[in-house]
Structure formats: structure tokens, C-alpha cells
Image (cartoon, rainbow, N blue to C red):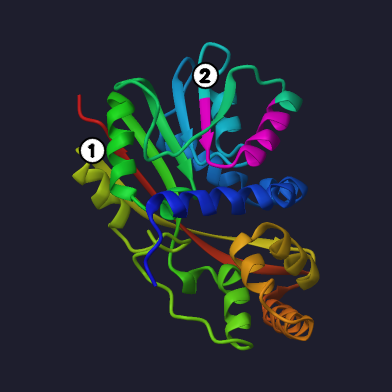
Amino acid sequence: MPQPTSTQIIEGQRQDWNRVAGGWEKWDRLFDEQMAFLNHRLVADARLHAGMTVLDLGSGTGYPALLGAQTVGPSGSVIGMDLAEHMLAAAGRKATRLGLSNVSFRTGDVTTLPFDANSFDAVTSRFCLMFLPEIPKAASEIARVLKPGSWVAAAVWSAPEMNPSIGLSMAAIKQVIELPPPDPTAPGIFRLAKPGDLAGMFQQAGLTDTTDQEFLADWSYASAEEYYTSLMEIAAPVQNLMAKLTDAQQQDVKQRILQAASNYRRGERIVFPMAVRFVAARKPL
């Protein structure tokens, strides 16, 4: 079977993210309460301050673009980019509710940025770059649009064994049907999990002063059922696989996921460990 082209991969991702945009907006408050610290870390690593012009890549429903807009203030501005127009529509609604007029959102492929060289004081990206079919090309584009002396800060998922909440569903599905082994070089959630992978790509793009740190934390749900429901509404790859199962197989997978999630009960909640890799780099003066 021929491998899909980069264009086909990106179009498939756009369709998937648009399909789950409603789920992300529905569960937005939960994830914001649980993971806001990630946005603050990115804002810090990118050295954001008042008056800066910032580009956020893979903004989704607005993270960390909205916090960036609050940080740079009315004298600064933020542009958030994402493939999925429905995700960005949710981000726009949040910006309106927050009264932020210095942030705008536009659809686009982050491997071909429609901006002049040396346009931005900082670039941020949360959980985006690992999904790209051509990450080195995106790194070069980031380096091109950054002003000399400015920083890029990106968050990507670390190793799968450090993020069990992400792998539970796939493990359960594999117990019910046979799945081909994943291609470690293909776009995917753990594509940049290894230390030095993204940092090396930034260096090859001409960026310097790279840092690469694994950041440990946790996130929680009120119950295993809440975890399962949110998963089925926001995880496009899981939706795609579940759609291929019979009703009986779907129920089997659900029970396996609920049982596995219950193993992470801590007190009254389900608490999962998480590990995120924060990578930052600067464009030389």
C-alpha cells in the first residue's frame, strides 16, 4: 500500500480535528483547570512580555495563544494558527468572552508559514509539532519568521509509558482486534518523545541555546466514566478505530478502558501521571 503524501496526512488531520472540535469545546473547562500550568510554562520559556508580537502554532481551542495575549497586553498581539477552522472558532469565542482584542486566529499549515522573515518576537506551540509530517521543515519556518534574539518554546508529549492515560484506549482496542505496529517515524502523539529529537531539529534549523526538559505532573478526572466519555469525544484516532468495531466489541473495549482507568484511583478521583517535554531555542542575533 502506498504511503500517504504530506498533503493527504494534513488533510486527514484537518478533518479529524474539525470532527472533534465540539468535544474539545465541551471539555474545555476541565482541561484548562487541569493543565493551565503548561500554558504558563510556555509563556515563560518564550520570554513573553508586554508589547511583543507572538505566533502560536497549533492553537486548537486557544492554548497558549489566549494566555499569550493576556501577557503581551494591548500594546502587543498574538496570531494563533491551526489546521482546523472549527477548533479556531471555539478559540475565537473564548477570546471574545475574555475581552481580548489583541489575538486573532487563522487556518494554515504550520510547515509553510505565510509571514515575512523576522516577523515575530516569539513563537509558542503546545502539542502540535509531533503531528507534522515534515517537522524539520516546520523548524526551519519557525527559525525564518523569528526575529534575531527571539525564542521559540514548544511542548510535546514525552514517552508513552510516562503517559498512561493516552495509551489506555489503544491497549484496550489491541486486546479486542489486531492492530499493525505503529511506525515510530510517522506523525503521531509520541513522535517527539525522545530526548533531543526536537531540540536537534531546532539546532539543524540554525537555532541556538536549546533546552530540553521532561516535566512531570498529573491530571485527574472525577471518575473512570468521565475519563472514558471525554476520551471518546476528543480523541479522533480512537474514534476512527472504534468506528470499525461491532457494538459488542465497542462495549468490550469500554469495559477494558474503565477497568484500566480504575487502577489509577487516588482517593475520590482518577489521577493519571503525565510527562511533557518542553523544548526552547533562540534565534541568534
The picture places residue 14, in percent across and down from the top left corner, at: 56, 48
What span is colored magenta in the figure?
79-95
Residue 199 relative to residue 262: left or right: left
In this rendering, is residue 5 above or below 106? Answer: below
| Gap in angstroms between the C-alphas marked 1 and 2 | 23 Å
Q: Secondary structure at mark 2?
A: strand
Residue occupying the point 34% across, 65% down: 185
In this rendering, is residue 117 above or below 267? Answer: above
Q: Amino acid at mark 1?
A: Leu
Q: Amino acid at mark 2?
A: Ser
Mark 1 / mark 2, whichever is N-terminal: 2
In this rendering, is residue 277 above or below 56? Answer: below
Q: Secondary structure at mark 1?
A: loop
Which quadrant of the view contains residue 175? Answer: bottom right
Residue occupying the point 77% across, 48% down: 26
The picture places residue 251, in percent across and down from the top left corner, at: 78, 82
User: Which residue carries the number 2 mark?
Assistant: 77
User: Which residue carries the number 1 mark?
Assistant: 207
Residue occupying the point 69% across, 76% down: 261
Crowd class of label 2 (few under 14; some 14 to 19; many from 20; radius 10 Å): many
Residue 149 relative to residue 14: left or right: left
Q: Does residue 91 show up magenta in the picture?
A: yes
Residue occupying the point 31% across, 35% down: 141
Q: In which quadrant will I find the N terminus?
A: bottom left
Magenta highlight: main SS: helix
Residue 252 relative to residue 146: left or right: right
